[in-house]
Image: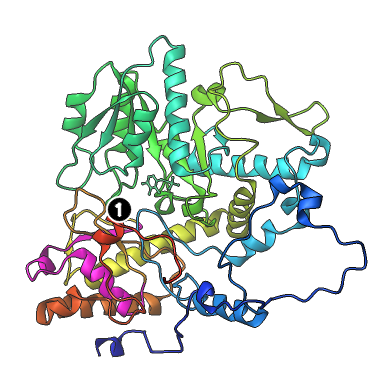
């Protein structure tokens, strides 16, 4: 079996029925003493109309059955504590345990947003410090921590631009978006009321300055640019591009999802960006969650500061923190309270644990790891662009596709070798894309094992393409029919008739 050279070994992974199927009437996972007060039924206590009818077939199992059930299920999962997540674009970096310890400090974990300011000084200091550190990292004068995700930060940023331009007399009509952009960029522009105009990339994978110039006029409000962009390449003309935009009275928004490649090395504010977001759940090692809670901190240059969502922190004459609600030019709130506070605490813990030099080292290690992978597998896979890679490298499946093996097949075969797949088929401008981002924490041994697996799969694609096309075979569930799963999903279990 090819997996003998990979890191996968067979181990105890048991079959598991659904809890519903394990149920037998009368079993319980608890034992309570006899009531020593008069018994009251739920109907008496709550009113019959508020009591739910019996759920038929509700599972009844013992304590050890519940625990074993969920423990066994947990062994089916792949997780960061098992191995590499080579997903690119959405930086999936390791979240150090210290972040969790700090987020559980009682005074922070139990803080309530309605506590009076006098009892919230520590929590306010956390927010103020994080704003200050991020401002320093971004090269921006002010930061808001309200947005709950990157896409939410984009929305906030474009609304800031809209409000700023409107205050000057004309909000304008168009937002320019490069063809390599993440889908949230055009979606944001449209939700903010703008028309989207596409800008072509050149052969190096960068924004093509000539095609940018050809669509840039006085109706353009902003350019939304990702840097490094979604093919993992630094936009070398970024300073020139920003100057071109400013000359026409337009603003530059930077999608900072790829800040993992810049922290401590280059500051967007210094290369001309007006407003940006950073996904703290990518660059600053906070959990992604299933669609949240995240944090999409937005940094702005000073001309956009008056428009930031309120309230904003300021100091009283006595030196205490207070919330300033008097923000007449603000775009208004974008979230209840002050952002996803627990996430902000984790990001601050990460920044403080590293310090400035540590963050810079993390960035350099992320770049090194990505380029190490690129160097090892480039002889086997077609690199999408010759330009130097930053924190991620993007290949195309053209070599393997000649034998009918596509990026999705290679990704599924990786599972057989004990790795989570890389990002498949994104960015869209690269046909059959394989996007790989190792992040800074991966040890050389893990990177070597990953590259060995990738190389072994490239060889299989030559010699025995059908093996790759039918992967995965080592998993509990073999290859699924994705089309039927998407078109006719079965999401509810029903007892057999
Ligand atoms: C992840 C990502 C986004 C969206 O961020 P969310 O936090 O998922 O909303 C936007 N742009 C790029 C380039 C991304 O990688």
Name the residue at 56% across, 75% down.
70
Quadrant where the N terminus is found in the figure = bottom left
Name the residue at 55% across, 43% down.
134
Question: What residue is shown with label 1?
Answer: 232
Pinpoint residue 189: horizontal percent, then vertical percent.
35, 30
Q: Is residue 101 above or below residue 176?
A: below
Pinpoint residue 155: horizontal percent, then vertical percent.
44, 33
Pinpoint residue 245: horizontal percent, then vertical percent.
31, 25
Q: Is residue 260 left or right of residue 239?
A: right
In magenta, the rendered stretch is 391-419
State whether residue 435 appears in this view.
no
Q: Is residue 170 left or right of residue 167?
A: left
- Nearer-the-camera pick, 60 or 423: 60
Name the residue at 14% across, 69% down.
405
- Nearer-the-camera pick, 445 or 497: 497
Name the residue at 29% across, 86% down.
3
Q: Is residue 291 above or below residue 250?
A: below
Quadrant where the C terminus is found in the figure = bottom left
């Amino acid at each position: 079996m090819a997996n003998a050279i990979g890191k996968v070994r067979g181990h105890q992974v048991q079959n598991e029925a659904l809890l519903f199927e394990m149920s037998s009437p009368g079993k319980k996972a608890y034992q309570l003493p006899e009531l020593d007060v008069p018994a009251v039924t739920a109907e008496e206590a709550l009113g019959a109309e508020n009591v739910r009818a019996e759920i038929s077939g509700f599972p009844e199992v013992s304590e050890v059955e519940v625990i074993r059930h969920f423990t066994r299920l947990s062994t089916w999962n792949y997780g960061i504590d098992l191995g590499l997540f080579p997903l690119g674009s959405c930086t999936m970096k390791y979240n150090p345990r210290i972040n969790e310890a700090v987020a559980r400090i009682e005074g922070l974990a139990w803080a309530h947003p309605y506590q009076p300011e006098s009892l919230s000084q520590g929590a306010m200091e956390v927010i103020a410090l994080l704003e200050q550190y991020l401002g320093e990292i971004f090269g921006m004068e002010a930061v808001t921590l309200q947005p709950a995700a990157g896409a939410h930060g984009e929305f906030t940023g474009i609304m800031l631009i809209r409000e700023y331009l409107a205050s000057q007399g004309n909000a304008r009509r168009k937002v320019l978006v490069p063809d390599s952009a993440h889908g949230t960029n055009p979606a944001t522009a449209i939700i903010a009321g703008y028309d989207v105009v596409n800008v072509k990339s050149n052969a190096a994978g960068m924004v093509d300055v000539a095609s940018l110039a050809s669509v840039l006029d006085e109706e353009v409000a902003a350019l939304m640019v990702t840097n490094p962009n979604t093919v993992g390449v630094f936009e070398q003309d970024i300073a020139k591009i920003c100057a071109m935009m400013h000359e026409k009275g337009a603003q530059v928004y930077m999608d900072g999802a790829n800040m993992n490649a810049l922290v401590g090395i280059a500051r967007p504010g210094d290369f001309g960006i007006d407003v940006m977001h950073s996904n703290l759940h990518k660059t600053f090692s906070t959990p992604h969650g299933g669609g949240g809670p995240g944090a999409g901190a937005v940094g702005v240059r000073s001309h956009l500061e008056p428009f930031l969502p309120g309230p904003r922190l300021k100091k009283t004459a006595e030196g205490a923190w207070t919330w300033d609600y008097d923000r007449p030019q603000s775009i208004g709130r974008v979230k209840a309270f002050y952002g996803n506070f627990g996430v902000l605490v984790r990001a601050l813990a990460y920044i403080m644990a590293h310090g400035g030099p540590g963050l810079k080292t993390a960035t350099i290690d992320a770049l090194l790891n990505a380029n190490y992978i690129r160097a090892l597998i480039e002889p086997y896979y077609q690199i999408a662009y010759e330009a130097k890679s930053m924190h991620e490298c993007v290949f195309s499946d053209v070599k393997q596709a000649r034998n009918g093996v596509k990026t999705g097949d290679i990704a599924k075969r990786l599972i057989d070798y004990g790795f989570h797949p890389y990002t498949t088929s994104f960015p869209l401008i690269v046909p059959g894309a394989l996007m790989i981002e190792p992040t800074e924490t991966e040890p050389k041994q893990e990177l070597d094992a990953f590259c060995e697996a990738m190389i072994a799969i490239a060889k299989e694609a030559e010699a025995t393409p059908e093996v790759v096309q039918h992967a995965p075979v080592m998993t509990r569930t073999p290859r699924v029919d994705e089309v039927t799963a998407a078109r006719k999903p079965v999401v509810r279990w029903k007892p057999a008739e």
